[in-house]
Image (cartoon, rainbow, N blue to C red):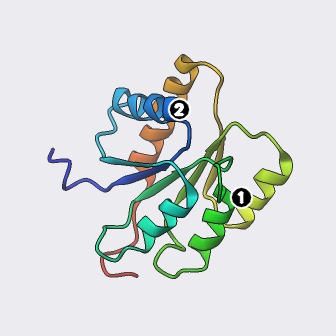
Amino acid sequence: MNSEALEMILLVEDSQSDAILTIRALRQGLIANPVEHISDGKTAIQYLMDESKRLPTLVMLDIKLNGHDGLWVLEQMQAQPATRLIPVMVFTHSDQQEDRIRSFGLGASVYVRKPVTAETLQQNIKSLGLYWSLTSTPPPEGFF
């Protein structure tokens, strides 16, 4: 299938090694969607607000980013009609209850704690990717 026809996934992750592992795990899980990797919150919001770009079907968001963190990104997304309904998978090392509560309060669809090993990460991403690709339906064309 042509990757241009597939909906894009936006990965907001400041760790280059975590980004590489995540993208590799998506590919091994047979998720062929193009992945746009952005390493900071401010650039992610600029990307999402750029009307010349297609909106992603899913945002995978680390909340522990340098500068503007992922919770700020969620706040900005909730404030804009065009991005408010984009599914967000918080994908982070944080296990703090406050982070989970704030993430869901700001519209996160799911909160996934990153595993410690690359093998576990690959298994989890494969399962999550399969789940997401089989069950998620984007809003209708022209909804926003």
Residue drawn 52% across and 71% down?
85
Q: Is residue 37 above or below residue 101?
A: above
User: Residue 76, how many percent across, how many down?
Assistant: 60, 72
| Residue 104, x across and y down, in percent | 71, 60
- Residue at x-position 55% and y-position 36%: 15
Q: Which image quarter: residue 130?
A: top left
Count of number-bearing discs:
2
Residue 127: mark in rendering? none
Label 2 near label 1: C-beta < 8 Å?
no
Q: Please tell me which residue is depicted at 84% across the width and 53% down the height of the picture.
A: 98
> Horizontal and vertical percent for residue 11?
47, 48
- Mark 1 — residue? 103
Q: Which amino acid type corresponds to the residue marked 1 in the rendered image?
A: Ser
Outermost residue toward the front? 67
Mark 2, residue position: 18
Q: Of label 1 and label 2, which has the lower sequence position? A: 2
Establish if 144 lies above or below 74: below
| Quadrant where the image shows the C terminus | bottom left
* x, y percent for residue 143: 38, 81
SS at mark 2 in the image:
helix
Q: Is residue 106 above or below residue 110?
A: below
* Above-or-below relation of 58 to 85: above
Most distant residue in the left direction: 2
Helix, strand, or loop for circle 1?
helix
Mark 1–mark 2 distance (CA, rounded to whole Å)? 20 Å
Q: Nearer the viewer, residue 64 or 88?
A: 64
- Identify which amino acid the numbered label 2 is placed on: Asp
Q: Residues within 10 Å of mark 2 (few under 14, many from 20)?
A: some
Q: Quadrant of the N terminus?
A: top left
Residue at 51% of width from left, 24% of height from top?
123
Given residues 72 and 135, the one toward you in this image is 72
Q: Residues within 10 Å of mark 1 (few under 14, many from 20)?
A: many
